[in-house]
Amino acid sequence: MKKRLKKRLKRKLNKKLNKIRKHLCLPPKPPPPPPPPIECDVLAYVANSGDNTVSVIDTATNTVIATIPVGNAPYGVAITPDGRRAYVSNYLSNTVSVINTVTNTVIATIPVGVSPLGVAISPDGTRAYVTNSVSNTVSVIDTATNTVIATIPVGIGPEGVAIGTVCQ
């Protein structure tokens, strides 16, 4: 019985307090402070087709900080928007190497069409598009599963690919 009475009184008091608050001109509560900035390195990933590696360059010091073995004749490189993965086309292996940019190691090798060259990542980071210059196709990779989900026929000898948002 006492608990019910307490609850009822508490509700009535809260209603009255809310009415009073509406009539007072109090400044709004300040927003919480922003989170501290995340420390990020700006790195360049360079495909070295002559020795089947990718060099990682720290752009702050202009020094090579890692050399990563990949497939044969790496050519194109694209980095996901969150910076966590690099996708590298391997021209003579007919594959794409996926690099974890935190550990600078290959975490997946994805078979694609013949002689892949260009690589581009969708703005939301969910897809990688790879041009296959001899098979005249574009492989679409699901970046969550690192599998080819579509192969699109295109013109003869596709090389470069770019993705952008086009507004009408």
Image: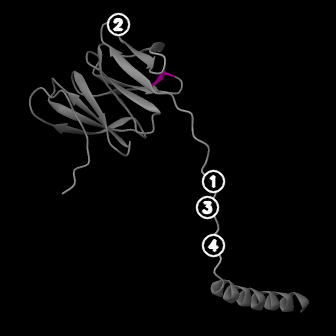
| Crowdedness near tag 1: few (<14), some (14–19) or many (≥20) residues, C-alpha within 10 Å | few
Mark 3 and mark 1: Cα distance apart in space: 6 Å
| Crowdedness near tag 2: few (<14), some (14–19) or many (≥20) residues, C-alpha within 10 Å | few
Mark 1 and mark 2: Cα distance apart in space: 49 Å
Q: Are marks 4 and 2 in contact (CB under 8 Å)?
A: no
Q: Amino acid at mark 1?
A: Pro
Tell whether 11 sits left or right of 59: right
The prevailing secondary structure element of the residues shown in magenta is strand
Q: Which of pointers 4 and 1 indicates the residue nearer the eye? A: 4
Question: How many numbered marks appear?
Answer: 4
Q: Which residue is mark 2?
A: 51
Mark 4 and mark 3: Cα distance apart in space: 12 Å
- Toward the right, the furthest residue is 2
Mark 4 and mark 1: Cα distance apart in space: 17 Å
Tell whether 161 sits left or right of 88: left
Residue 1: quarter of image? bottom right
Quick one: SS at disc 4? Answer: loop
Q: Which residue is mark 1?
A: 33
Q: Amino acid at mark 2?
A: Asp
Q: Which residues are magenta?
A: 104-108
Q: Which of pointers 1 and 2 indicates the residue nearer the eye? A: 1
Residue 22: quarter of image? bottom right
Instruction: Please tell me whether residue 29 is drawn above or below residue 15 in the rendered image.
Output: above
Quick one: SS at disc 3? Answer: loop
Q: Position of residue 152 (x, y in %)?
A: 19, 39
